[in-house]
Amino acid sequence: MRVALQRALPPVLDDRISGRASRHCRVSAITSTAVTGLTGFVSILPRYDPLRTGPTLSNAAPTPLLRSKLFWVALLYFSEGFPLGIFYDIFPVWFRQQGVELRNIGLISLLGLAWTFKFLWAPAIDHYRRHRVWMAAVDLLMGAVMLAFAVTEGLPLWVWFGIAIFTVLSATNDIAIDGYTIELLNRDEMGIANGVRIGFYRVGMLAAGVILILSDLLGWSGAFAGTGLGIVLGTVSRAVSPEKRSQAVGAVAALGSLGTLVLAPVGQGLIDGFGWREALFVFAGIA
C-alpha cells in the first residue's frame, strides 16, 4: 500500500513529505537530548559541593556556608563592585550637592581611567603573588580615604586627588581579587563561580546606593564614616585563608560587609558627642 501510494504521488510532493518527516525526527532528537541534558544538570545542582573537585554523593554532609568557596567568592566580588558604585553613583551626587558645576562633575569620569589602564600594573601584582595581602592592604587604604572624606568640610582641591587614589586602589583590588579567585577555584568550579562573580559584582554596585540613603539621614560625613569602617572591617575576609577561617572570623567578615548600615549611626553619634578628632581615635582603635 505504501509503495503504491508513493508511486501515485508526484516526485516533488513525495520529497516534501520525506523532508518534513526527516526534520521532525531531527527536532525530536534535539529536544530529547536537550531535556536529558537539562535534567542531568539540575540533578547535580543540589549535590554540588564547592570545596570538592566535583559532584559529591547525595549522602555527603553539606558544606558549612562560611567554609564554602562560593560564599567567599560572592563576598569578594561584592566588595569589588561596591567601590565602582561609589565612584559612578555617589561622588557625582556629593559634588552636585556641594555646588560643583555639571561640566566639572563630568571630569570625574576621567579619574575612572584607572580601571581601564590597570593592565599596566597587573603583571607586578601577579608577579609578587600574595593576593590576600594586596586585598587587605588596599581595603585598609580605601577605608582611610573614605574616613578622610568624612572629616572634610566642603570640597578642597585634595579631594580630587583623593578620588584618584581611591580609583587606583579599587583597580588594584580588582586585580588581586581576580588572581586570588583563579587560584582558589578548581577548573570544574569555574562555571558556577563565574555566575556568582558577575551577579554579586552587580549587587555590590547597586548596594552603593545605600550611601545616598545614609547621607539623607546622617549627612555625608556620617555616611562616609560608616562606609570607611565597613570597608576596613571587611579586610578580615581577605587576610585569612579559606582553610583557616573559623565561624567567628566569618561572622566578623560578614558584619564588616554590613558595616555601612550598622556602624554609621554609631560613628555619627561619636562625632556629634565628642568631635571629629576624638572620634577618629575611636575609629583607629576599632580598625
Image (tube, rainbow, N blue to C red):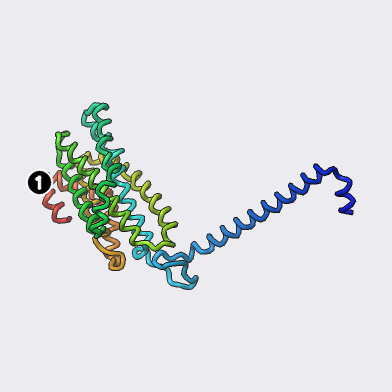
Residue 99 horizontal side relative to residue 1, left or right:
left
Residue 271 lies, with reference to residue 194, above or below; the image says above
Report whether residue 54 is seen: yes
Tell me where residue 241 appears, x and y as whole percent.
28, 64
Q: Quadrant of the rendered structure where residue 165 is?
A: top left
Of all residues, the one furthest to the bottom in this rendering is 59
Alpha-carbon neighbours of circle 1 within 10 Å: few (<14), some, or many (≥20)? few
Residue 154 vertical position relative to residue 174 in the rendered view, above or below: above
Identified at 23% across, 41% down, the residue is 218
Q: Residue 228, image x and y in percent?
A: 21, 48
Looking at the rendering, in which quadrant would you find the N terminus?
A: bottom right
Q: Which residue is mark 1?
A: 277
- Locate the C terminus and report the quarter of the image it occupies: bottom left
Which quarter of the picture shows residue 159? top left
As drawn, which residue projects farthest toward the left?
A: 277
Q: Residue at x 23, y 47 (%)?
A: 169
Identified by mark 1, the residue type is Arg
Identify the residue at horizontal 68%, vertical 52% (top origin): 26
- Residue 63 percent across, percent down from the top left: 40, 67
Residue 170 visible to the viewer: no
* Nearest the eye: 161 or 175: 175
Q: Residue furthest front?
A: 11
Q: Is label 1 in a helix, a strand or a loop?
A: helix
* Residue 152 picture location, percent across and down: 15, 39
